[in-house]
Every structure is written in C-alpha cells, then in structure tokens.
Amino acid sequence: MKDKPRKKKKRKKKNYLLRLLVIIAVGVGLYFLLSSELFDVGSVKIANNKYYTVEQVKDKAGVKVGENIFSINTGKIKDNLLKDPYFENVKIRRKLPSTVLIDVTERKEAAAVQLDQHYIIIDPNGLVLRKADSAPKLTILEGLTVKKSTVGKALEVEGNSILAHTLEMLKAMNGSELFFKKIDISSVVIKAYIYDQLICEGTPTNMTENIKNGNLEMTLYDMYNKGIERGVLKIGSDNYCSFDPMIE
C-alpha cells in the first residue's frame, strides 16, 4: 500500500516535465515564427497627409522596410513625426503580417506674418509652422510687432489679443467664399484687402460677425456684379456696411 503514493508522485513529475517541454517547444517555435521573414516590414502606408508627400512622411517617421514588424518602436516613430510642427497627432498600428499604417493629423496653414523681407507661416491658433523667404499663397498679416517667432511655438507679438481676434476672423473666412489678400492689423480697426484697391475696414469682431452671417459676402458679391473693384467698405455691428468709393 505504501508504494502507491510514490507512483502517483512519479506520474505527476512526469506530467509536469512533459508540460514544461511542450511549453518550451511552443515558445521556441513561436519565437522563430515571429522572427521569420514573414513578419518583416514590407510596406509603410500613410493616411491623411496633405502638406507632406508620402515619401517625406516615411522619411521623417524613420520606419525601415525589412525590419521585423514586432521590433519597431511605435513610440519613437510617433516622437519622430511630432517633432515637426505640421503634425498635430499621429496614430500608428501594425497590420500583420508585414504592413505598418501611419495615420497623421496635420496642422493647416492659416496666414503669413510679414517680418522685414521674410514670412512667418502660422496655423489658425498662431503656432509657427515654418519661415519662408517668398510670399506664400496665404493671407498676409502686416503691421504686427513680432517679439519672438520660434518654429513649433506660438508666435509672440505686441498686442496678442488683436492677433487672436484676427485669426478667429480668418477661421470664419475659410468657412465662406471670401479671401483676403492681406490684412493690416496695425490698429484696432483693421484693413482687410479683397483687391489692392478694395478694402474692408472694421474691428476683427465686427468683421467676423458679418462674415459668419453672410452679410459681408453678400455685399461684396453685389459690388462684384456692379463691377466695383475700388473703394472702402466700412463694417460695423448689427450688419452695418457703408461703402466709400474714395481711398485715403
């Protein structure tokens, strides 16, 4: 009777050993499978890029074709891209067996602030995206005193509130059919140029209100139909618009 417990113990030890060997064999097999060429990165797909080309995003991301898909550091790839101020957000995922998907959210160019002979390109929130030597096809902001302009940081100017209100006006402009070639914001009453000789004058708040309710667009459309391309359109509150054909 005393030998039976010993036999049970031996059987248990054999079962444990067998299970351990199976687990090790599966683990080794899985390791070699995941390390095989089957899971080497074969393609990198980019989504929602507009400012940068697909190849430019790939280059900035630093993903290498041929690298094992499980060994890529998605956090590092995201950090690489977010160093560039044009990227507001980045999502990365693996699509097995060999594809890396990078979905980017880019900041949009809103305006250019003229500084001497250079231009500071900013987004709708005043973040500096880049600097340019030639005028971009954006609304040019004149009359600002720039205190500090660092790429990737908010533009610092004297009278930040007037800049903030003007940017709100530009957001409203982008939601309409209007486009201002340039805006002089050297004073509280700004001058927004439709053409070189056709100017809208008013505070940014009043201009924004008249853009959002469609009053300014309708007035300018009526002037366009009449062939008017010169003069000053003074904008006030409560849909007030007064046209003066004379330019100071």
Image (spheres, grey):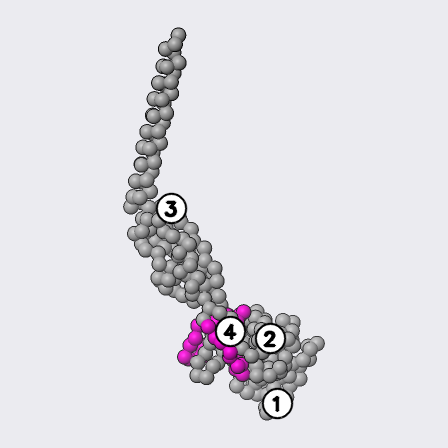
Amino acid type at circle 4 is Leu
Label 2 residue SS: helix
Q: CA distance from mark 2 to mark 1?
A: 31 Å
Please state which amino acid type lies under the numbered disc 2: Ser
Give the mark, 2 or 3, whose residue is nearer the N terminus: 3
Relative horizontal placement of residue 147, taking residue 211 as reference (left or right): left
Q: In front: mark 1 or mark 4?
A: 4
Q: Amino acid at mark 1?
A: Pro
Location of residue 56 with respect to 133 vertically, above or below: above
Residue situated in front as seen by the camera: 239 or 21: 21
Report x, y in % for residue 11. Answer: 36, 18
Image marks 1 and 4: residues in contact by CB distance under 8 Å: no
Residue 168: quarter of image:
bottom right
- C-alpha distance separating marks 1 and 3: 66 Å
User: For mark 2, what is the residue?
Assistant: 161
Q: Which mark is residue 173?
A: none
Return the mark for residue 96. 3
Q: Provide the residue designation for mark 4.
A: 155
**Upstream in sequence: badge 2 or badge 4:** 4
Mark 2 vs mark 1: in front: 2
Q: Earlier in the sequence, mark 3 or mark 4?
A: 3
Q: Which residues are magenta?
A: 122-150
